[in-house]
Amino acid sequence: MTDVPTFAPAQRPLRVAVGSRNPVKIAAATAIVRHAWPDAIVESVAVASGVPDQPWGDDETQRGAIARSVAARAALDADLGIGIEGGVVDENGALRTCAWAAVSMADGSVHLGGSLAMPLPPAVAHLVRDGVELGDAMDTVSRSINTKHGAGACGILTAGIVDRQRAYEVLVAYACAPLLAPEFWVPAQADAGI
């Protein structure tokens, strides 16, 4: 992809902390990190999201991802922290999914990437509106066990075309974009015609 950006310590491998013990979130973050920085050390740690177990709306879901990334980085004194949070959004009476990834850096900067907008079927939406977490609602409707640590709602509802890990990998890559292509994040110069 690209050389290790300037934030990576030259004398040791990049250390990355993932703010979750969920194997799907860890695998998604690890896949992107290892693709970009093959020698990176990826560790996970359980941290609080600071939002309800079932976040509602993009803003609350983003706050959860940011809180996880910042707390994970601090807890493991890592170079980067990665947080991933899934939520639901009510749009005109219909529910859809949302998910966000955040990458926090030692200098305090945070980068976000996300979306994962997919409509939820009425039976699932009904359960979520009644206070059931999306993963548990999917377990009930699909008669499965612990889907949030596996295929997830997106895997079940797309008949396996896109599973939860692959969907989260894209979000992590989006959040890493300023680190992967830093030349595009330099301030625009007035005299450069931009």
Image (tube, helix red, strand yellow):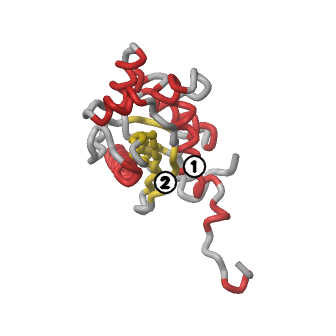
Residue 135: image quadrant is top left
Q: Residues within 10 Å of mark 2 (few under 14, many from 20)?
A: many
> Mark 1 near mark 2, Cβ–Cβ under 8 Å?
yes
Q: Position of residue 81 (x, y in %)?
A: 43, 47
* 72 left or right of 173 in image: left
Q: Where is residue 107 in the image (x, y as percent from the top left)?
A: 43, 62
Q: Name the residue under label 2.
A: 112
Q: Mark 1 points at which residue?
A: 174
* 35 left or right of 46 in image: right
Residue that protrudes farthest toward the right in the picture: 193
Per the model, the C-alpha gap separating discs 1 and 2 is: 7 Å
The quadrant in which the C terminus is found is bottom right
Q: Which residue is drawn at 42% across and 17% down?
A: 142
At label 2, the amino acid type is Leu
Query: In this rendering, does residue 75 appear at all?
Result: yes
**1 or 2: tag closer to the N-terminus:** 2
- Residue 161 vs residue 93, the one in the foreground: 93
Placement of 126 over or under 84, stated as above or below: above
* 39 left or right of 104 in image: right
Q: Which residue is drawn at 57% across and 26% down?
A: 158
Query: In this rendering, does residue 85 appear at all?
Result: no
Assign a secondary structure to mark 1. Answer: helix
Placement of 182 over or under 91, stated as above or below: below
At label 1, the amino acid type is Tyr
Residue that protrudes farthest toward the bottom in the picture: 191
Q: Where is residue 120 in the image (x, y as percent from the top left)?
A: 45, 33
Placement of 146 over or under 72, stated as above or below: above
Assign a secondary structure to mark 2. Answer: strand
Residue 187: image quadrant is bottom right
- Residue 104 vs residue 92, the one in the foreground: 92
